Amino acid sequence: MSTSTEQLSALGVSIWLDDLSRERIASGSLKQLIGDRNVVGVTTNPTIFATALAKGEAYDAQVAELAKAGTSVSDAVFEITTDDVAAASDIFRPVYDATNGQDGRVSIEVEPGLAHDAAGTIAQAKELWAKVNRPNAMIKIPATVEGLEAITATIAAGISVNVTLIFSLERHRAVINAYLEGLEQAKAAGHDISGIHSVASFFVSRVDTEIDKRLEAIGTDDAKALKSKAGIANARLAYQVYEQEFSSERAQVLLAAGANKQRPLWASTGVKDPNLPDTLYVTELAVGETVNTMPEKTLEATFDHARLEGDKVTGAYAAANMTLDALDALGISYDEVTALLEKEGVEKFIVSWNELLDTVSAALEAAK
């Protein structure tokens, strides 16, 4: 009998862990997840690092060293986080080699305060890439309007990118366009485009949280019947966008020249509503050529009891469109919801980033 995580991998879904800490690296638990849970990558964000730094003693020695050197808080954060990502990248290097660069990836995000600063994002993406100095790193760039320009420029420089905070289908198309533009520029500049990889992180549970709140307020039977359906419908249609865009003549020319597709990545897959199955955003979005990045709780639930029934996406586009149409008929604006979620997403990461700075500042002070 194969495990549920083995079955998910066999369907063509890459399982990435949405967590990283030095304790996890040093204890060997990260390496163990590769063998025991079919984990083939890692994603990080400011919240994850803030949590890791606030717990345990794994960072004490480095913090003391940085304090002694008089390192600034922002430089200390840069050193600490890039060290963790480099160490995790080394652990995943065999996976990277075995999958020809598709997996074995470890993502690190540009400062969230740069989300609306294209030039600043491009500069920091290059700094992070150079500092981590591992081919299997990925630089996370948010899919804001300004982020699109940064995605193109970063890909054009030959740097692999994890595009984060995608909520709408329109923005997903724009992200794919930015990726293809970057590949075209990279190819023209003489880069080996076969070595450039990207994922498009499409957020799921946050869509349900916001829309379900609005459905509750409406309160009719029709509204209640749509609860917890929007996130999955939206993500399924994002996969349709992926299929359409990468079957275009423009994409096919690049793929024939060795380029890689920008795989959809399902993010925000931890279930927020306790009344829902805890593996909902795993089983209902199982389809080949995708990544599902899971918090550990979701990963363990998937391993323990996920029931996989094959591809749950490509045959469901008509039903997904009907769900979004029904929401529109109730007066719930898709454009308003997705714009709000992007704004809140950036704001939440800025709050976490400031918490991270405060945590490191206090640690540096204590170590003096």
Image (cartoon, helix red, strand yellow):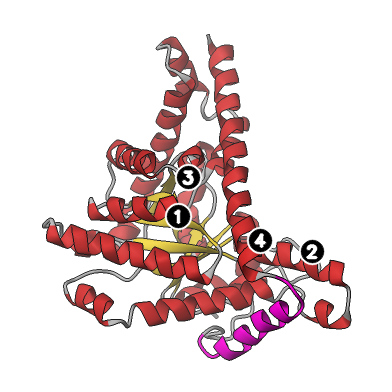
> First in sequence: mark 3 or mark 1?
3
Task: Identify the residue at horizontal 56%, vertical 20% (top origin).
Answer: 361
User: Can residue 212 be seen?
Assistant: yes
Q: Which of 107 and 351 is in front in this view?
A: 351
Residue 345: assigned label: none
User: Is residue 319 in the magenta section?
Assistant: yes
Q: Name the residue under label 4.
A: 206
Q: How crowded is mark 3: few (under 14 residues within 10 Å), some or many (20 or more)?
A: many
> First in sequence: mark 4 or mark 1?
1
The CA distance from mark 1 to mark 2 is: 27 Å
Residue type, label 2: Lys
Element at badge 1?
A: helix
> Which is closer to the viewer, label 4 or label 2?
2
Q: Where is residue 266 in the image (x, y as percent from the top left)?
A: 53, 66
Q: Residues within 10 Å of mark 2 (few under 14, many from 20)?
A: few
- Where 197 sits versus 81, above or below? below
Residue 145: assigned label: 1
Q: Name the residue under label 2.
A: 213
Q: Mark 3 points at which residue?
A: 115
The CA distance from mark 4 to mark 2 is: 11 Å
Q: In which quarter of the image is the N terminus?
A: bottom right
The CA distance from mark 4 to mark 1 is: 20 Å
